[in-house]
Image: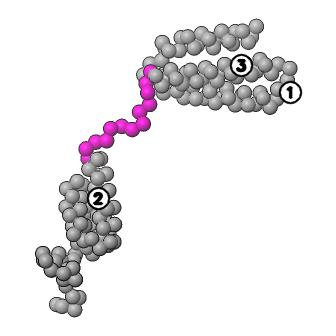
C-alpha cells in the first residue's frame, strides 16, 4: 500500500509541476531535478548490487526509477520555464577591452618577428580601443617597446637604416 501511495504522489507531482513552476522557482526546480535524477540513478546502481540479497529488490528498483524519472522531468520543466543563459551580453566597453587584448597579443608576436611597422599600426588601434590595456599591458612589453623606439626608415631606404647606430651621440 505504501508503494502505491508513493507512485500516486509522484504521478500527481508530475501532473501539477508544470503549472506551478515560475521564472523565480525555475533554478530551484532544475537543482531539485538534478539531485533527484542523480539520486535515482545512484539508487538503481546500488539496488543492482544488493538485489541478490533482498527479496523486495523489484520494489526498490521501481521506486528509484520513478525518482529518477521525476528528477529528469522536474529538470526539464525548470529548463522549459526559464532556460539557463550561459552568458550575459557583452557590453561595448568589454568588447573593446577584449579587442585591445587580442591586438596586444598580435603586436607582441609581430614585435618578436621584427615586424615593427605592424606593431606601430596596432599600437594606434589598441590605444583607440582601450587606454588602460594600452598603458598597462601594451606599453609594458619589452619587445613592443623596442619596436616602438626604433625610428621608422624613410620610404625606399634599406631596412638596416631603421635603427641608428648605438655609438652616435
Q: Give the quadrant of the C terminus.
A: bottom left
Residue 81: image quadrant is: top left
Pointer 3: what residue? 63
* Residue plotted at (53% across, 11% down): 16
Residue 61: image quadrant is: top right
Total numbered labels = 3
Magenta range is 81-93
N-term mark: 1 or 3: 1
- What label does residue 148 carry, if any? none
Is 114 situated above or below 135? below
Residue closest to the eye, 139 or 61: 61
Disc 3 packing (10 Å; few <14; some 14–19; many ≥20): some
The overriding secondary structure of the stretch rendered in magenta is loop
Residue 148 shown in magenta? no
N-term mark: 2 or 1: 1
Label 3 secondary element? helix
Q: CA distance from mark 1 to mark 3?
A: 17 Å
Label 2 secondary element? helix
Pointer 1: what residue? 52
- What label does residue 103 carry, if any? 2
Disc 1 versus disc 3: nearer the observer: 1
Residue 78: horizontal and vertical position, in percent? 49, 23
Disc 2 packing (10 Å; few <14; some 14–19; many ≥20): many
Drawn side of residue 105 relative to residue 67, left or right: left
Residue 105: horizontal and vertical position, in percent? 33, 61
Residue 90 shown in magenta? yes
Amino acid at each position: 500500500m505504501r508503494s502505491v501511495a508513493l507512485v500516486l504522489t509522484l504521478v500527481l507531482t508530475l501532473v501539477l509541476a508544470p503549472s506551478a513552476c515560475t521564472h523565480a522557482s525555475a533554478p530551484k526546480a532544475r537543482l531539485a531535478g538534478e539531485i533527484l535524477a542523480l539520486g535515482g540513478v545512484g539508487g538503481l546502481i546500488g539496488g543492482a548490487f544488493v538485489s541478490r540479497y533482498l527479496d523486495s529488490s523489484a520494489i526498490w528498483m521501481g521506486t528509484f526509477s520513478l525518482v529518477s524519472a521525476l528528477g529528469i522531468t522536474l529538470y526539464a520543466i525548470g529548463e522549459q520555464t526559464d532556460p539557463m543563459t550561459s552568458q550575459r551580453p557583452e557590453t561595448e566597453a568589454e568588447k573593446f577591452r577584449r579587442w585591445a587584448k587580442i591586438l596586444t597579443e598580435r603586436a607582441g608576436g609581430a614585435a618578436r618577428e621584427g615586424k615593427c611597422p605592424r606593431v606601430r599600426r596596432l599600437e594606434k588601434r589598441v590605444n583607440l580601443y582601450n587606454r588602460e590595456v594600452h598603458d598597462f599591458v601594451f606599453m609594458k612589453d619589452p619587445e613592443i617597446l623596442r619596436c616602438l623606439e626604433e625610428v621608422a626608415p624613410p620610404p625606399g631606404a634599406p631596412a638596416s637604416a631603421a635603427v641608428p647606430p648605438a655609438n652616435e651621440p
